[in-house]
Image (cartoon, grey):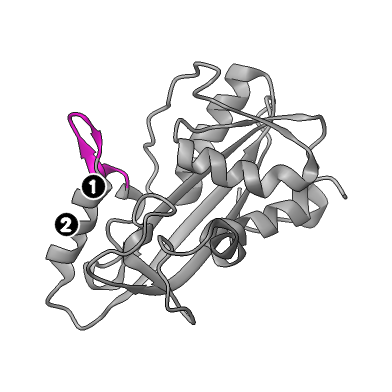
Amino acid sequence: MGEGGAPSRRRRLEGPTLVLATHNEGKLREVAELLAPWGLEVVSAGSLGLPEPAETETSFLGNAGIKAVAAARASGLPALADDSGFSVAALDGAPGVYTADWAETPSGRDYAMAMAKVEKLARHSSDKRAWFSCALVLAWPDGHVEGFLGEAHGEWIWPPRGTNGFGYDPMFVPHGHAETFGEMTPAAKHAISHRAGAFRLLSKACLPAR
């Protein structure tokens, strides 16, 4: 599986229903909005009661592949998985694939705490570069997978700004913009986000013609 792969091996998505391999409502909303023009029925792995597999890979594409394959096999339907993360140059790319882990607490994920941790560790560096990465993997019950990677580059800021989006969005200002992802409208963010970049590649290769 790779970002591109040989065009001759691409598989188009057929059928009206797609499982989104997530238990995260924020991701469900964003991906469902991106898929809306294709008229696909999107159901989440959480709503189907599917377990969350252990993410044991060290790359976004690897972890997305684990989730997509597990959901497709368990549901008998094509499944799309997203694995995304926030990286800071001054922290050698951390939190990266451990983005969600930095927010874990005994009572659930606390992204305000996670953002504060990033600021504490990176505050003394003059290098403010940061980026979001998103891997999208589409898997079928027979094990066939297609994978795509998108990125959005910019800088991290402190204090965080905005209540839109989710995760680390309030501390990230993309290049060429003054607003954080947390301040942007969903439509504005979708136009330039890492997830939108990966989705453009996926839609061109695997979604049916509109």
Quadrant in which residue 68 is drawn: top right
Left or right: residue 200 versus residue 102 is right
Magenta span of residues: 100-109
SS type, badge 2: helix
Q: Is residue 11 visible?
A: no
Does 101 appear in magenta? yes
Quickly name the residue at label 2: 117
- The amino acid sitting under disc 2 is Lys
Left or right: residue 80 versus residue 95 is right
Report, in whole angstroms, how far the alpha carbon at label 2 lies from the one at label 1.
Answer: 8 Å
Question: Foreground residue, 20 or 144?
Answer: 20
- The amino acid sitting under disc 1 is Trp
Task: State the image coordinates of residue 87 (x, y, percent, origin top left).
Answer: 34, 63
Up-down relation of residue 205 to residue 70 (above or below) = below
Q: How many marks?
A: 2
Task: State the image coordinates of residue 107 (x, y, percent, origin top left).
Answer: 20, 29
Residue drawn 46% across the image and 59% down it: 133
Residue drawn 37% across the image and 55% down it: 163
Q: Residue furthest right?
A: 210
Q: Looking at the image, tell me whether mark 2 or mark 1 is earlier in sequence order.
A: 1
Residue drawn 44% across the image and 53% down it: 165
Residue drawn 64% across the image and 54% down it: 199
Q: Residues within 10 Å of mark 2 (few under 14, many from 20)?
A: some
The answer to whether mark 2 and mark 1 are in CB contact below 8 A is: yes
Quickly name the residue at label 1: 102
SS type, badge 1: helix
Does 187 appear in magenta? no
Task: State the image coordinates of residue 27 (x, y, percent, origin top left).
Answer: 50, 42
Quadrant in which residue 4 is drawn: bottom right
Up-down relation of residue 198 to residue 192 (above or below) = above
Q: Residues within 10 Å of mark 1 (few under 14, many from 20)?
A: some
